[in-house]
Image (cartoon, helix red, strand yellow):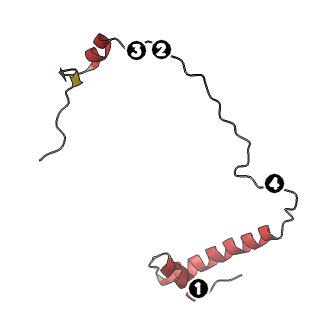
């Protein structure tokens, strides 16, 4: 199925794209090839095939939540470049 330049121009307008003449010609061929491939896929017999969302069956692997010891106050404070009243003190990054 060969798309005309007018059809490509219409699709470009719907997509709010501005195409040059050579782009319209190139995209006409590319979009036509895509539509031809879709037509080939429509010819396949898919009766009895379950619809899937992915090609491989993937299962999530969950781990049990484990309660772990909290950081002691000295360890996290030792990594801070500066602190003030139990908060990290950082340089101001927003002007105003």
Mark 4, secondary structure of its residue: loop
Of the numbered discs 3 and 4, the one sitting upstream in the chain is: 4
Q: Residues within 10 Å of mark 1 (few under 14, many from 20)?
A: few
Q: Residues within 10 Å of mark 4 (few under 14, many from 20)?
A: few
Q: Nearer the viewer, mark 2 or mark 1?
A: 2
Quadrant of the rendered structure where residue 43 is? bottom right
Q: Which residue is mark 3?
A: 70
Q: CA distance from mark 4 to mark 1?
A: 35 Å
Of the numbered discs 4 and 1, the one sitting upstream in the chain is: 1
Q: Which mark is residue 50?
A: 4
Which residue is outermost to the left?
Answer: 96
Q: Which residue is mark 2?
A: 68
Q: Residue 68 at x, y = what percent?
A: 47, 14
Q: Residues within 10 Å of mark 2 (few under 14, many from 20)?
A: few
Mark 3, secondary structure of its residue: loop
Of the numbered discs 2 and 1, the one sitting upstream in the chain is: 1
Q: Nearer the viewer, mark 4 or mark 1?
A: 4
- Up-down relation of residue 51 to residue 71 (above or below): below
Q: Which residue is mark 1?
A: 7
Q: Residue 22 at x, y = what percent?
A: 51, 81
């Amino acid at each position: 199925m060969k798309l005309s330049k007018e059809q490509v121009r219409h699709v470009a307008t719907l997509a709010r794209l501005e195409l040059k003449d050579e782009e319209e010609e190139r995209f006409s061929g590319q979009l036509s090839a895509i539509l031809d491939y879709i037509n080939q896929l429509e010819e396949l017999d898919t009766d009895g095939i379950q619809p899937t969302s992915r090609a491989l069956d993937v299962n999530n692997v969950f781990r049990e939540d484990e309660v772990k010891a909290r950081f002691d106050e000295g360890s996290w404070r030792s990594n801070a470049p500066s602190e003030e009243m139990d908060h990290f003190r950082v340089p101001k990054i927003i002007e105003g």
